[in-house]
Amino acid sequence: MSKLDKRYDFIYFFDVKDGNPNGDPDAGNLPRIDAETGTGLVTDVCLKRKVRNYIQLTQIDEIKRQPLKRYDIYIKEKAVLGRAHIEAFNALGIKLGTESKKEIPTDLIDLIQEYDLPEGITYEEIDDDKFQLVIAVDADIKSIKDTLKELPKADKVKQFITASLKGVSSRKPKSEEVEKGRAWMCDTFYDIRTFGAVMSLKSAPNCGQVRGPIQLTFARSVEPVVALEHSITRMAVATEAEAEKQSGDNRTMGRKYTVPYGLYRAHGFVSANLADQTGFNSEDLEIFWKAMQEMFEHDHSAARGLMSARKLIVFEHETALGSKPAHELFSRVTCKRTNDENKPAREFSDYEILLDGKTFPELLKVVPVS
């Protein structure tokens, strides 16, 4: 595993046909679009999610069905992030306190949900209409008690929290221990040492913050896109009441949103200096390039239509600091139409991607920067 000693800047082209590349939950899951220009958008978070999924799928021990060493994923589906923090300190032999949980009386549930709880105390649902108060393993009990002293004595929530603190054993990690936890997390989780993470959670031991060496911009379509809305029908209903209401017709109507075609362009940056801080190495980088080329092949769904990686142009500098500004390098890559620009594009063949005015056949193109 060799240390990363060069800076990289890259441009990534991908396209979508008859699909929704990145729905906006605040807009009914419509494809994201720049309201002023009409160009389509795909967030950096969406692209990172696909990289994470690819790593989870490919970097695995086929016998044990567990992630290979250094290739676990921190932000994954249904993950409870605090568990990884506790695992880190346990692996390092650093003693913490014990997490304390106490069921919340029914008459206090609404009050606690509106309460400004002290740091280190949260609540969680354990069953329908049942909640419990959670005191973190690294909660600062003295600080919590000092905060509670400022509240009225008759406050029912204050009385409940004060009673819950009795007998609780907790310990906040020291600064040098936090740094050890941070290093362990970087060494264990690929996405932390690649993209970074904020690991100073209220409900878990503090593992610090990490600024990742790889950063991505939003992807933006090279031309405006149109979001289409389609009515769809399911020949079934969910309940007996719906069937009775429809007299046995049993149809359910729905909506589906797609972009007929869009070619998207994103920019990315790889910092050798930040890679040195997180332990991100050349092997990790090669896996990242492979993920960018292949991740759509393992992410197909009816909602996303046909998504494909088209071009990955990587500018490789000679040094860690680099020799030219990224925007100068990015300007060397252009995209132009191969047919009538007045007609909407519907295929990748409707475009040409040019490097210094010339086409190139390969998907991954590494360009040395002198």
Image (spheres, rainbow, N blue to C red):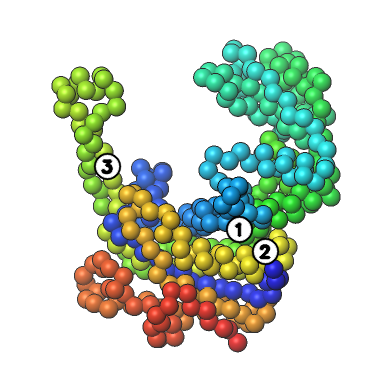
Percent from the top left, x then y, of residue 206?
74, 43
Per the rendering, the mark at residue 255 is 3
Which image quarter is the C terminus in? bottom right
Give the vertical position of 130 relative to 176 (above or below): above
Q: CA distance from mark 3 to mark 2?
A: 43 Å
Percent from the top left, x then y, of residue 223?
33, 67
Q: Secondary structure at mark 2?
A: loop
| CB within 8 Å, label 1 to label 2 | no
N-term-proximal mark, 3 vs 2: 3
Q: How many marks?
A: 3
Q: Secondary structure at mark 1?
A: helix
- Disc 2 residue type (three-letter): Phe
**Residue drawn at 76 percent across, 16 percent down:** 163
Give the residue at mark 2.
280
Which mark lies nearer to you, 3 or 2? Answer: 2
**Residue drawn at 41 percent across, 43 percent down:** 26
Quarter location, residue 227: bottom left
N-term-proximal mark, 3 vs 1: 1
Percent from the top left, x then y, of residue 68?
63, 54
Per the rendering, the mark at residue 195 is 1
- Disc 3 residue type (three-letter): Arg
Give the vertical position of 216 relative to 19 (above or below): below
Give the vertical position of 120 relative to 221 (above or below): above
Is residue 97 rendered to the left or right of residue 102?
A: right
Q: Residues within 10 Å of mark 1 (few under 14, many from 20)?
A: some
Residue 47 visible to an observer of this rendering: yes
**Residue drawn at 52 percent across, 72 percent down:** 10
Quarter location, residue 296: bottom left
